[in-house]
Amino acid sequence: MPTQLALLGGQPVRERSFTRWPIFDERDEQRVLAALRSGKWGRLDGNEVETFEQAFARMHGCRHGIAMVNGTVSLRLGLVAAGIEAGAEVIVPPYTFFSTASAVIEANMVPVFADVDLATFNLDPAAFEAAITPRTRAVIPVHFAGQPADMDAIGAIARKHKLLVIEDAAHAHGASYKNRPAGSLGDLASFSFQSSKNLTSGEGGVVTSNDERLAAECRSLHNCGRIPTGIWYEHHVISGNYRLGELQGALLNAQLERLEEQTRTRDENGQYLAARLSKLPGIHPQARPEFVTRHAYHLFMLRIDGEAFGAPRSAVVEALKAEGIPCSAGYGFSLNQQPMFQKKAFGPYLAVERDKLEYSKVHCPNSDLLCKEQALWLEQAMFLGTRADMDDIASAFEKVSENGVALTDWWRKRGAK
C-alpha cells in the first residue's frame, strides 16, 4: 500500500527548507560597502559597472556588455538600436514573461505570436517561419527556463528573411548551446538581474553583443543619447538615463564570482532529477536537445499529462506543496491572452496599427495547453542544494503518483464544496 499523502493526513516527505535565495556573505558586503564609502555611486563616477560589463560579456562570449536598469529596458533598447521602423512586426513566443512582448510595444512595434514547441517550451522554428510577413523585421527567441532555443534553425530562418535576432536570455545566465554561451548566439541579447534571477542585484539588466554598431547604439541610448566624441550636453537621439548604478554593479561583481559553480550545480542536479522523474507515467521533463550543452535551470520545467499521471495538475501542485516541495503552475494563460493584448491597452504606442490588430483571434495551442493544464515549475534555488534534495523532490512526485486515485477523489470532493 502506498504511503498516505501529507495532504490527506500523512507524513510529508520533506519538512526542511531548500536553499535560500539570494546567497550572499561578507564578500558581497565588503564590495558594496567599498562602493558606498567611495562616494561614487553613479555609473559615470566609478568603475564597478564597467568592470562587471566587461566580465559578464567575456563570460558570455561577447565583446560588449551594456548594463541597464532592468531586462525590459535592455530588450527595448536593443530593438531601437537596430533602427527598426515604427509599426514593424517582431515575432515572439507566447509562453514567456510579459516583458518579451511589452518591450516590443514600447519600441512602437507590433508583437506577433508564434507558438512554442510542446516538448522544449521554446519557440518552434516552424511556427516562427510561418508567422513571417513582409512587415517582419525581428524575432526574439526566449531561452525559457534557462534552456537555449534552437538557434541554428532560428538563425537560418532569420538570415533567409534578413531579420534581427535578439535573444531573450533573462533565464539563461551561464547556459550554452553547442558549447557557445547564451548571449552570443544572435545579433543582441538581453539578460535580467531581477530578484529571482540566477544572477541578481535586486533589479538590473544587460545587453550583450559582438556587433560594434549595435553595441554603440545601445550604449548611446542608455546614456541620454550621448556619443563618446561629443560634449556632455550633446544628445544625438531621443533617449534617457537607463544606466545601472555603482552599488548594484558592486553587488553583481561579487555575485558573478559564484555564477560558474552555481550553474554547474544547477545543471547537474537538474539532469539528475529529470532522469528520475521521466520514469513516472505522465511526467515529461523539459526535453533537452543535444545542442543544449548547459542548461541554466532558472526553472525546472515539466509537463503533467493528468490522465496518464492519475491526477490533474492543480491537484498535483497542492499535493507536492503539502509534501514540502514548493512548486507552481506558472503562467495562467498565454501571453497573447493577457488583458493588455485583448483590450489593446497600449497607451500612446501603435496608435495607427491598433485597429488592425486582433489578438483575440491568435491561437497558440501548445502554449495554451502548457498554461491551462500541463506546465509545472520548480525554482532555481532548489537546484543549488544536494543530491539528497533532488531525491526528496523525486520521492514526493513518486508518492503523489502512487496516490493518484486518492488525490483525484480529494480534488473532486473539494471542487464539489
Image: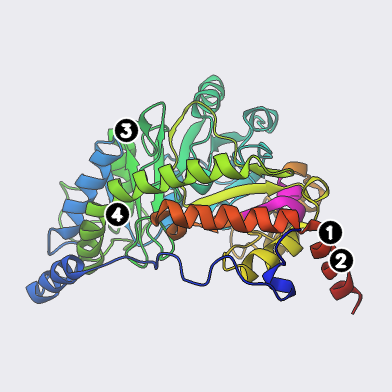
Q: Nearer the viewer, mark 2 or mark 3?
A: 2
Q: Secondary structure at mark 2?
A: helix
* Residue 374 lies within the magenta run: yes
Kind of residue indicated by mark 2 = Asp
Q: How many marks?
A: 4
Q: What residue is disc 3 on?
A: 211
Please tell me which of labels 4 and 3 falls first in the chain. Answer: 4
Q: CA distance from mark 2 to mark 1?
A: 6 Å
Q: Quadrant of residue 42?
A: bottom left
Q: Secondary structure at mark 4?
A: strand
Say whether residue 256 is left or right of residue 151: left
Q: Earlier in the sequence, mark 1 or mark 3?
A: 3
Work out how far the residue at label 4 is from the one at label 1, CA to CA, in angstroms.
51 Å
Q: Nearer the viewer, mark 4 or mark 2?
A: 2
> Is residue 39 a member of the stretch shown in magenta?
no
How far apart marks 4 and 3 lie (CA) works out to 16 Å
Task: Read off the residue under disc 2.
Answer: 409
The answer to whether the residue labelled 4 contacts the one labelled 1, judged by CB atoms less than 8 Å apart, is no
Specify the amino acid type for callout 4. Answer: Ala
Q: CA distance from mark 4 to mark 2?
A: 52 Å
- Residue drawn at point x = 88 percent, y = 73 percent: 413
Q: Is residue 356 visible?
A: no
| Relative depth, front residue between 38 and 394 | 394
Q: Is residue 210 left or right of residue 396?
A: left
Q: Which contiguous range is marked in magenta? A: 367-376
- Residue 67 image label: 4
Please name the amino acid that badge 3 sits on. Asp
Choose between 385 and 375: the one closer to the eye. Answer: 385
The residue lying furthest to the front in this view is: 1
When the figure is inspected, residue 12 is found, relative to residue 204, above or below; the finding is: below
